[in-house]
Amino acid sequence: MAYDDQNIFAKILRAEAPAFKVYEDEFSLAFMDVMPQVDGHTLVIPKDATENLHEADPEILGLTIVNVQKVAAAVKKAFDSPGIMIAQLNGKAAGQTVFHLHFHILPRKDGLDASMHAREMADFTLLEDHAARIRAAL
């Protein structure tokens, strides 16, 4: 499948769609998932037009994963979470629904169930609050 530059993450990167930004540098962007599985569900995407892990430029992938690590530490701190789940899906059969490489960061606590994709949008005021908490923890 060829990269679709009309996917929602590509639009966010071009500022054609809104996002509750957490962190950004020249290689990647972190923002709140608008359909979160848990409070604090954050996404990190490379700025490179890459559909999945298998097609990623290794150098950009390495720089992106450094930011996954940085943002995950901030999410853990901001949500006082004893654990963090990092998920990355490749292809429709794996559950990928937006075909731009991305990493899910989900704070985890004992007894907390979570699936990979929600069915409802979160309240945007809550997402902005969560983004501010994570930015403060960076």
Image (cartoon, rainbow, N blue to C red):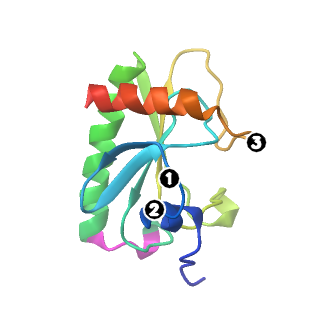
- Could you tell whether 122 is left or right of 25 in the image? right
> What is the number of the mark on residue 119?
3
Q: Residue at x 61, y 37 (%)?
A: 36
- Position of the N terminus by quadrant: bottom right
Q: Residue at x 60, y 42 (%)?
A: 34
Residue 83 or 36: which is nearer the viewer?
A: 36
Residue 54 or 18: which is nearer the viewer?
A: 18
Category of crowding for the residue at label 1, using alpha-carbon neighbours closer than 10 angstroms: few (below 14), some (14–19), many (at least 20): some
Mark with earlier residue (1, 3): 1
Question: What amino acid is labelled 3 in the image?
Answer: Arg
Are the residues tagged 2 and 3 within 8 Å (C-beta)?
no
Question: What amino acid is labelled 2 in the image?
Answer: Ala
Which percent across, then down, holds residue 120? Answer: 74, 39
Mark in front: 1 vs 3:
3
Instruction: Confirm whether the magenta stretch covers residue 39.
Output: no
Mark in front: 1 vs 2:
2
**Main secondary structure found in the magenta portion:** helix
- Position of the C terminus by quadrant: top left
Residue 69 or 127: which is nearer the viewer?
A: 127
Mark with earlier residue (1, 2): 2
Which percent across, then down, holds residue 125? Answer: 56, 29
Which percent across, then down, holds residue 119? Answer: 76, 42
Residue ID for mark 2 = 15
Q: Residue at x 38, y 25 (%)?
A: 133
Q: Residue at x 36, y 30 (%)?
A: 134
- Could you tell whether 46 is left or right of 34 in the image? left
Are the residues tagged 1 and 3 within 8 Å (C-beta)?
no
* C-alpha separation, residue under disc 1 versus residue under disc 2: 23 Å
Are the residues tagged 1 and 2 within 8 Å (C-beta)?
no
Question: What amino acid is labelled 1 in the image?
Answer: Gln
| Relative vertical location of residue 120 with respect to residue 48 in this rendering, above or below | above
